[in-house]
Image: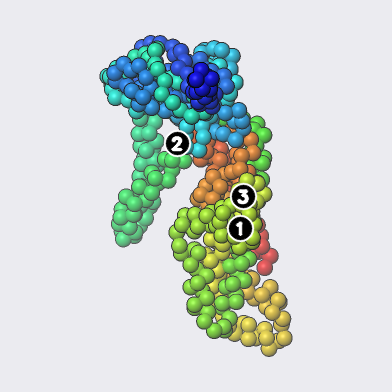
Amino acid sequence: MNRVNSILVFFLLLIILIPSSISESTEIETSEFNAGNSGYKSLQIRFSAVQGIEKYNVYFSKEKFNSSSAATLHSRIMVVKDISTLDKFSSEDSIAACWFSTDGSFQSSSLQYSYKDDWGVPVVPSNSTNIVYNLVGLQTNVTYWFTVVAVNGEEEDIDVNNAFSASTEVQDVLPPSLDKTPIYLSIFLIIISVTGTFYYLSYNEKDSDNKLGYLYSYPAFLLLCILTFYPIFSGFYLSFTDSTSSKLGDEELVGFDNYIQVFSESSFIRVTLTTLLWTITNVSAHVFIGLCLAMILNGDIYGKRVYRTVILLPWAIPSFISVLVWRGMFQPSGLINQMLGIDSFDYFSSTSTALTIVILVNIWLGFPFMMMVFSGALQTIPKDLYEAAEIDGVSNFNQFKNITLPLLKPTLIPVSLLGFIWTFNMFNVIYLMTSGGPVVEIGGPGGSDILITYVYDLAFPGGYYGLAAAWSVIIFFMLLVFSFYYAQVSKSMEAST
């Protein structure tokens, strides 16, 4: 009997010990709050890290509690070893951010923003020693009780011995009102300039009907100038400041520091070359494919109206719908892999394949417009020119070279320039397909990023408005120089012919 009891006791101990070796939840010590750590609907928590765990659970309640089951899970902080593929929180996320240090200090100089996963959950490296976390979504002027539990494996209910309390503030501390004087001054100068120009033109106009025309067109032209030139002036001004999401309205002039930073970045040449490759390849393909299809459909073929309608569909459908469909097709489990018989190949994990895909998708979206433009231009060329050339025995290539191409130049040159500018600043295709990925360097442009998508990442997820404005000004001058050069080359070509 004693032997049987010993065996039963052994198995009972085994049942108790096995779960404890698989999962472990430990309450950890947490620092007390002070007045500077409370905020509007938010509180800040500081605690020392625990080694060898998978995550931290933060529990809270309006009443003091003695076990985690009696409280509500507020949030989790994950712990991982490999953080190379994760993004960091930024100053824009400071309201709901997490920080960590690896030197055992809570000093601001030692703390750095934590990482976050695809769902925005904070992630800290396994070698962290101290963690600071903002708890948001709380009610105002309420006292809460909190505790932090270090979890390794499955979660379980544990006893709580050191829950602490803190109160949120009654109301938010709003920043001072922005100084809108520069805004009003800029708009006033635009109004004065436009008004003075219209007055001068109408004063020198002798025809009374034309003077009345200036009066009628003045309001629309004034509004157009305000909507056009004010953002340009504002962008130029921001590019000379240190404006960020945390200093908006409190920025200071920093001269050419932002421009120096742009040109000193190692990724500047790479993202510029990627933009040129993207633009030149797309525009060349748009013009070539569009012109070829326009010439084919301009001939006497049966059902060309149906063909023209079908080809125009990619351009007629909203581009974001088409791009999202293509993105789904290129997923590892998408239609492309199924058709090719490939098992879960990720086209977006490599820079070369990701960039190739977005270029092909944009070519598919853009050539119908060029075909439509060239179709209209080809129909204006007199048919008798081709008939005379055929009588003289001129080959089809020479007809294209000496008749079609020269007469298409008034259309070809401006539409190519317009296509270059559109494609240079094409945002939606790359953003919806790859979001600029894959990651090439932390904090820099991705493998498929072009200038405009990288500027967006700097301005909005990053919150670096001054630096993004400097990039935008550089893009503006790039397009200005190209447009001027293209116009000069076009004039010289027209003069030679």
For the point 28% across and 22% down, the residue is 140
Mark earlier in primary sequence (3, 2): 2
In the image, residue 264 above or below residue 206 = above
Residue furthest to the front in view is: 1
Instruction: Check disc 2 and report the residue beneath it.
Output: 234
Q: Quick one: label 3 or label 1, which is nearer the N terminus?
A: 1
Of the two numbered discs 1 and 2 in the rendering, the one whose residue sits closer to the viewer: 1
> Residue 492 appears at what percent x and percent y?
66, 60
x 64%, y 39%: residue: 440
Task: Please say whether residue 229 is visible from this viewpoint.
Answer: yes
Question: Looking at the image, which is closer to me, 24 or 322?
Answer: 24
> What residue sits right under mark 3 in the picture?
346
For label 1, the residue is: 337
Q: What is the three-letter code of the residue carrying label 1?
A: Asn
> Closer to the camera: disc 3 or disc 2?
3
Residue 289 position within the rendered picture, expressed as x and y whole percent measured from the top left: 61, 67
| Whether label 3 touches label 2, CB < 8 Å | no
Check if mark 3's residue and mark 1's residue have beta carbons within 8 Å. Answer: no
Can you give x and y, in whole percent of width and height, for residue 182 in the image?
A: 39, 31
